[in-house]
Image: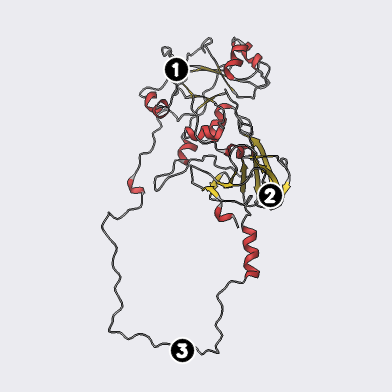
Amino acid sequence: MTFHIRPGLLVVSTALMAVTACSEPIDLDFRGAFGNAPSTAAAARNAVSDRPEPDARGIISYPGYQVAVAQRGDNLASLAARIGADPQALARYNGIQTGDPLRDGEIIALPGRVSEPAGGPIHAPAGVDITTLADGAIRKADANKVETTTLAPSSQVGIQPIRHRVERGETAFTIARLYNVSIRSLAEWNGLGSDFSVREGQYLLIPVAPPGEQVKPFDSAEVQAVEPPGAGSLTPTPPSASKPLPAEKTVPKSTPVKSSAPNLGTTQTVASNSRMAYPVRGDIIREYAKGKNDGIDIAANPGTAVKAAANGVVAAITEDTNGIPIIVVKHPNNLLTVYSNIGNLAVKKGDSVKRGQKLAEIRRSGTAALHFEVREGFDSVDPIPYLG
C-alpha cells in the first residue's frame, strides 16, 4: 500500500532529533495521553518488530511491493546494478539522482518487482487481518490500488507495512505522529541520518507491531472513580450557634505588624535562575496543547529579533522540507528550547549563547509569529511556567 497524506499542521520537533548527543537515552515517543486514558508511550517503544532482514542483494519483498536496502558505500547507480533495476527509473520514483550517495540501511522503493528472494515474499502470519490493522490509514489512502501477488511459502513471516511517500512540508516527526509510532523506530526502519531529515518524494516504511501483538484494551478500573451526576457532596456541619464566639483580641495601634511580603532581594535571584525570558514580546496567539501544539505561538512583526530564552549552546540548526530554519538550544538540566518560523540566523551550531542574545529574526513572509517550545529531554512541556 502506498499512502499520500498531508498533515494539516507542520510540527517543528524533528529538529530535536539532531541533539542525540545527550548523555542518557531519551524517549522519542511524542504521543500524549488524553484525560485519564492509559498512555500509549510504552506500546510505541516496545511493541514494534525489527525490520525484516534483506537478502544478499538488499531486497525485502512483500506481497504488494519490494524495497531495496542500501549498503555502505552505495549510490543509486551501484544499488540498481546490484539488484538488476533501471537506475533512472529508481531515481524518478524516489526523488533523487542516480549519483546521489545513500546511507547504510536507507530504504529505496522499487517501482516494479525484481526477482524474488529464494524464500519468496514475506507473508503474514496465520490469523492476522492486515486490512483491520491498517483500517485507519486505509480511510485516508490514495485512490490508486496496489496490485498484490499470490502469497508463496516464505522463510520470513511478518505484516506488510504501510509505505508512505513524503510530501512537501512533512518531517519525520509529523509522519511518526501521523501513524502513532516513535521517531526512533521510524529512523531505524528506514536508515535515517542523525538529523532525521527526509526529502520530498522519499518512501518510508512505517514500523509494525510484532505478529500476534495485542493492544491492551481500555480498562475502566485504571481510571479514577468518578461520582455519578447528581450525587452531590457532603454538606459540612455548620458551627453551633450555641457556642460563643472567641473573644476578640485587640491589637494596640503601636504594635508593628510583621509584613508577609517576600524579600525580593533574595527571591528574585532564584526566580531568574530557574526561569526563561520571552524570546520575543507579543500576544500569545496559540497556546500550548499537549499532542496538538507542542509549544506556543507568539505574535511578532517580521524582522523582529528572536532572542535566546536562557543561557545555553546551539545544539542543532536544521530546516523543514520547506527550507524554513529551526534552531534548537540546549540548556542545563536536560532542557531544550526550540525556535521556528525564523530567518536571518545570527548563530551557528555549537555557539554558546546568553539569555537575551539574538538568535535570528521573524521571517519576512508567512505567519508573523514565533513558534517556541520548551522540552524536558524530548518531552514537550508548557513553556509558560518557565517564562518570566
Q: Residue at x 27, y 54 (%)?
A: 229
Disc number for residue 243: none
Number of residues whose C-alpha sits closer than 10 Å to that of mark 1, classed few (under 14), some (14–19) or many (20 or more) = few
Q: CA distance from mark 3 to mark 1?
A: 87 Å
**Label 1 residue SS:** loop
Kindly identify the amino acid type of the residue bearing the numbered disc 1: Asn
Q: Residue at x 60, y 10 (%)?
A: 86
Q: Is residue 357 visible?
A: yes
Depth check, mark 2 against mark 1: the one in front is 1
N-terminal label among 2 and 1: 1
Q: Is residue 376 visible?
A: no
Number of residues whose C-alpha sits closer than 10 Å to that of mark 2, classed few (under 14), some (14–19) or many (20 or more) = many
- List the residue tagged with mark 2: 312
N-terminal label among 3 and 2: 3
Kindly identify the amino acid type of the residue bearing the numbered disc 3: Thr
Give the colour scheme of this rendering.
secondary structure
- List the residue tagged with mark 1: 144
Is mark 3 in CB contact (under 8 Å) with mark 1? no
Q: CA distance from mark 3 to mark 2?
A: 56 Å
Viewer-nearest residue: 200 or 99: 200
Kindly identify the amino acid type of the residue bearing the numbered disc 2: Gly
Number of residues whose C-alpha sits closer than 10 Å to that of mark 3, classed few (under 14), some (14–19) or many (20 or more) = few
Q: Is residue 339 above or below residue 112?
A: below
Figure quadrant of residue 101: top right
How far across and how far down the image is residue 302, in percent?
64, 42
Q: Residue at x 56, y 32 (%)?
A: 172
How far across and how far down the image is residue 178, in percent?
48, 33
How far across and how far down the image is residue 50, in percent?
51, 28
Depth check, mark 3 against mark 2: the one in front is 3
- List the residue tagged with mark 3: 250
In the picture, the quarter occupied by the C terminus is bottom right
Q: Is residue 37 above or below residue 163?
A: below
